[in-house]
Structure formats: structure tokens, C-alpha cells
Amino acid sequence: MAPDKDIPTYNPMLIAVAVSLAAFMEVLDTTITNVSLSHIAGSLAATQDESTWVLTSYLVANGIILPLSGWLAGVMGRKNFFMLCIAGFTAASFACGIANSLPMLIGFRLLQGLAGGGLQPTQQAIIMDSFPPEKRGTAFGITGITMIVAPILGPTLGGFITDNFSWRWIFFMNIPVGILAFFLVSRMVKDPDHAKAQGVGSIDYIGLGLIAVGLAAMQIVLDKGQEDDWFSSHLIVTCTIISVICLAAGIIWIWPQKNPVIDFKLLEIPSFGLACVVILAVGFALYGCSTLLPLLLQSQFGYDATLAGLVLSPGGLAVIFLMPIAGKLVNKIQARYLIGFGMFVTSIGMWVTMHVTPQSSYGTFVIMRILQVAGLPFLFVPCSTLAFSHIPKEKSSKASALYALMRNLGGSFGISILLSYVTRHQQMHQTYLAGHLPPSSDAYRFNIAQYTHIMISHGITAAAAAKLAVGKMYQELIKQSTILAYTDTFQLVGIVLFILACCTLFMPGNKLHKKPDPDAAPVH
């Protein structure tokens, strides 16, 4: 039998590593700047609020390109598009590193987001075509390391670089990685016939414009909503209206098109549509909780950026260890059972994190974080396998783009909703605790007397000590109410995941590939 011309010349595992290197770099940049905003703001003479546009601009540009990457890959060829994204992302990273003003940095971050948006879905499409069906579990395990470990390590690496060097090296470090990835992809990756350039043909300007504007407006709402108190802000109201109208009109316009820029009809395939719902939940839990825990540690426990990141790092190592196991099991156990197991384990991790107290230690937080992420490999790998189990090869690029969009939207929703939930519950607990601790209560009087005595013993006058004691009581009240708000939020995520774990039992089954296809050509 003649070798299949779609089979890669190089070992598929080497191809997976090469394309994952570029995608890892891009995903890392979604979170690596989170802990560096105050340093960036100070260096560029900007306010803290203004510096958040360094994050927003990247996410907006990224969100626009993600769903369009499948169409763009078809226009110029998948390999050409992927290499263009790597080159553009690397060049934009260098430009971000040398930016000498905030508007310049925001502009370059927009370019970085536009170039990087095509890396995730194209990586997944290349990996799917490089491996035979019975080995895709292992392949998606590699993809999972990229998608899950990168956002976990981002704050750790960003904090270490910022504290010990300069925030500019956050961007400069992408340059050697980008050059290496570009070289490896140019040598190893080969486009199968269905992924070669098809030319521009006719461009659906209306559908393209509606979806781009709608997603950009949605990302601004999700990223700035909590900061601007949601619908009390004219910006948020305007962007919400624009997003709803444009996205609804865009879907209606694109649906009947023969060659749409985004193939929404893929969602009609049960395995793909349900997998997109699951990956939305995975993004919600992963990105939401990866944002919450460092904030809790830095705001209430006095951790610096590096130490807060180090709480997350052991969880990333646990994910790396468990990914290959999940990749092997996906060929032996139905994906829906693994997904249900993963959601159940993650929900248990959230339940454990509910029991944070002001006395919780570093080791306790590390164990909690490992339990939070231990179920993610059993979610991501089988979910990806199920999603692409019935996708035709010629649709792989567009399916990967839509799948990546759902994951990123889940992350954006998770961060926005959970941060808002924390704020609302902090206010609620503060009111409750203040109402149950009146100045006439024995507990209040005891603590005030104790704080006053400690301050007097340090040489402070009795009158000043009494005032400081009241302030200390208020600080404790704020700390207790904030910790309770975070535990409520982890509880919410745990409940949602537990309910979804039960629902996964009703997902469709997938074909198990326990043995290689005897007709498959060998890989040289």
C-alpha cells in the first residue's frame, strides 16, 4: 500500500512538541502580565486603571482572531498561517519590550494578540492530523499541557521576572522561543491536501465585521465590567448592546453561508457541541480560580507576586504528571466517564478550598491548589478527543478555532463572574459580621481591650491606642469577610462542576481506539 500523503514525514510526537512550543508561549502571555501591572504603570507613568488595558487589549485582539483562524488558515494554507502567527507574535513581543509609553505598549499588545490568536487552534488542528485516531489521546495530552500549565505558570514566571529583573523581560523571553518554534515548524510541519492554501475567493465582509465587533465588545464588557460596576457604566451598557446585536446578527447572517468564516453548524454535531459546553466550563474553572487564588494570597495573606505564583506551580507539575495517564485512559474508557470523573475531582478540590482560614499556611494552600487542578487532565484530554471524534479532516481547522474560542470565552466569563461574586459576597459578609459584633458585645469589648493593651505596651498613649484598636478591629472584620467571600466563590465553582459531572453521564459515547489500524501506513 502506498504511503498516505497526509501522514507526516517526521515523528508526530516531534511535530506536537514543535507546534506546542509556539502555543505555550502565546497562552503564557495571557496571564504572565497579571502580576506586573503595577510595575508597568510605574515605569510608564500611568495609573493602575490605565495599565489594565495592557491585558484588555491583548484579550480583545485575541478574541477577534480566535474564531477566524480556521478561515484564515484555509485562505493562506495552515502551515503558512501558523508560521506567520509565530513571526508576528515574536516581532510584537520585541516591540512590547521596547515600548516607552503606555499607548505604544497597548498598541503593540493589540498586534501581539492578533498574531497570537491563531496559534492555539492551528496547533490543535495540526496535532489532530498528525496522529492516527488511536494515539490522539496522547496527542491531546500534550495540547493539554500547553493549555492548562501555561496559565498556571504565567503568574509565577511573571512575578519572578518582575521582582528580579524587569517587566520588559516578560516580552523579551518570547523572542528565542519564537525563533526556535519558527525554525522547527518550517522544517517539520507539512500541510495535508485539505489544509493547503485555497485562496481568498469571496470574502464575507459583513459576517467578518459583525463577529469581530461583537467579540471585541463582549471582551471589553467581561474584562472591565467589575472594575466599572457593570451596568452603572455607560461604557459597559453600550458595549453590551453592541455585542448582543452584532453577535446575534452575525450568527444569523453566517449560518446559511456555504463557506462561512466561522462554521457554527459544527455545533450541531452532538459530540462536538457538548464538548464545547464542557470546555467552556473547564475554562471557567481553570482561569477563574487561577486568578482568584493569587489575589486572595496577595491581598489577605501578604504574599508577594513570586510566592503567590509558587503556590500555583506544584499544581502545574501535578497536571504534567497526570496528562499522559489521561491520554492513555482515553483509549480504554469512554470519554464521558473520564470527563465526569475529572469534574468530580475538581469539585472536591473546590470544596476543600472552601475551608481557608486566616491561619492557613503555605503548605496548606499548595495542597489545596493541587487538589483543584488534579481533575483537569481528565477533563481536557477526553473532552478534546470527544470533540474531534466526528469532525471531518477538512473541517479540523475551523473546528479547532471554534473549540478554542469556547475555552477562552469560558475563561473570560469565569474571571469576570467570579470576581464580581467575591465583591458582592464580601459586602454581604461585612454587613452580617458588623451586625453581629456590636460595641456592647463581650467579644468586641474583649478584643478592643486586648488590642489597646498591646499598643500601650509599645509606648502608645491610651487615647491613641483606643483609636488604633478600633481600626484594628475593622481590619480584622474586612479580612474575615473577604476570606468568607472567596470561600463562597470556590463553593459556587464546586457546586457547578458537581452538577455538570452528573450531567456528563448523558453525553454520547465515543469509539475507543484500543488497537492501531492495520491498514495504516508506518511513520518514518
Image: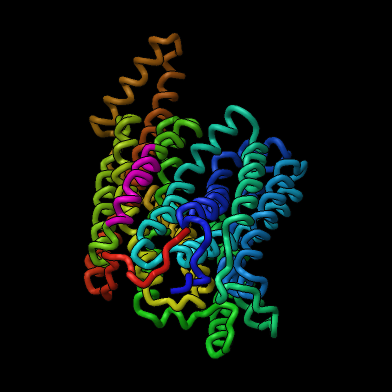
Main secondary structure type of the part rendered in magenta:
helix
Total labels: the figure holds 0
Return the residue nearer the eye: 432 or 37.
37
Answer whether residue 336 is visible to the viewer in this image.
yes
Return the residue nearer the eye: 439 or 302.
302
Residue at the image point whose x is 51% and y is 70% from the top: 6
- Percent of width and height locating residue 133: 37, 67
**In the figure, is residue 122 to the left or right of 362?**
right
| In the depicted structure, whether residue 433 falls above or below residue 271 | above
Q: Is residue 276 magenta?
A: no
| In the depicted structure, whether residue 460 falls above or below residue 98 | above
| In the depicted structure, whether residue 283 falls above or below residue 348 | below
Answer whether residue 214 is visible to the viewer in this image.
no
Residue at the image point whose x is 66% and y is 64% from the top: 80
Q: Quadrant of the N terminus?
A: bottom left
Residue at the image point whose x is 40% and y is 43% from the top: 316
Specify the quadrant of the image occupied by residue 462: top left
**In the figure, is residue 83 to the left or right of 431?**
right
Return the residue nearer the eye: 421 or 31.
31
Colouring convention used in this rendered image of the protein:
rainbow
- Percent of width and height locating residue 493: 33, 56
- Percent of width and height locating residue 207: 63, 81
Instruction: In the displayed orientation, state which residue is furthest to the front.
Output: 1
**In the figure, is residue 263 to the left or right of 355?**
right
Magenta residues span 314-328
Specify the quadrant of the image occupied by residue 34: top right
